[in-house]
Amino acid sequence: MSHVFEGILQLPPPLALLLVFLLPALEASAFVGVVVPGEIGVILGGVLANQHKLPLWAVLVAGVGGAIIGDSIGYWVGDRWGERLLGRLPDRIIKPEHVDRTKDALRRLGGKAVFLGRFTAALRALVPGMAGVSGLRYRVFLAWNALGGLCWGVGFVLVGYGAGSQYKRIERYANYIGIALLVLIAAYFYLRHRRNARNGGDGATGSPTPDREAAPAGR
């Protein structure tokens, strides 16, 4: 994957910024993520911002926007053509066990599976489409998708920005970094809940409500 990293860093800044948007956008909408993980473009966008070749705000907007828009497209593709499309894709591209794991996560967790799947490379390309197949309401999907895309995009851009010229050291650990980000986010919401509880608040975390996550029959 090193040659992909190097190739992106050598691109003119406007094209590199376009890739920061396109890689996460195509990850779920076109299943590109099963071959090239979307965090590659987002991390390298942060590296380019560190090198002052791109403004940090533009990289953040591109990475987060690509994640949210791409997953929304993936949802609608799954809603309309999901089962037929999955049946035609070879097992070497999308492994049946990953499909089964995604279906199980959506069945058990509903919209929260959309957020959690964002931080796991094996699920990120599949969850949006499978959410559409499963009948998860789009408004619920969008709320959790936006929260996950925001946390994931900002987190990985800042990882790349902090790594700077040492980005090669994090290349092989990108999936573990995603899991670490998820743990940090969960810890933040847990501590915020505890603080609100001590202060007599209602313990709201500001996260999307998972009520009525699954669409009723005959949606």
Image: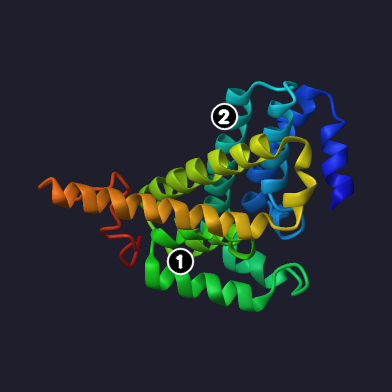
Tell me the kind of residue under disc 1: Ser
Question: For this view, does 200 lie left or right of residue 193?
Answer: left
Q: Nearer the viewer, residue 132 or 154?
A: 154
**Three-letter code, disc 2:** Val
In the rendering, at what x and y percent does residue 29 appear?
A: 63, 50
Q: Nearer the viewer, residue 97 or 164?
A: 164
* Discs 2, 1 touching: Cβ within 8 Å: no
Q: For residue 52, say whether it is visible.
A: yes
> Residue 81 at x, y = what percent?
59, 60
Quadrant in which residue 82 is drawn: bottom right
Report which residue position mark 2 lands on: 61
Residue 22 vs 54, above or below: the answer is below
| Left or right: 138 in relation to 3 | left
* Residue 150 image position (x, y, % from top left): 49, 40
Residue of label 1: 134
Residue positioned 55% across, 59% down in the render = 179
Quadrant holding the C terminus? bottom left
Q: Which residue sits at x=75%, y=57%? A: 172
Q: Secondary structure at mark 2?
A: helix
| Element on which disc 1 rests | helix
Q: Looking at this view, is 132 or 1 the one in front?
A: 1
Instruction: Using the rendered view, name the quadrant where residue 111 is placed.
Output: bottom left
Q: Residue at x 58, y 55 (%)?
A: 178
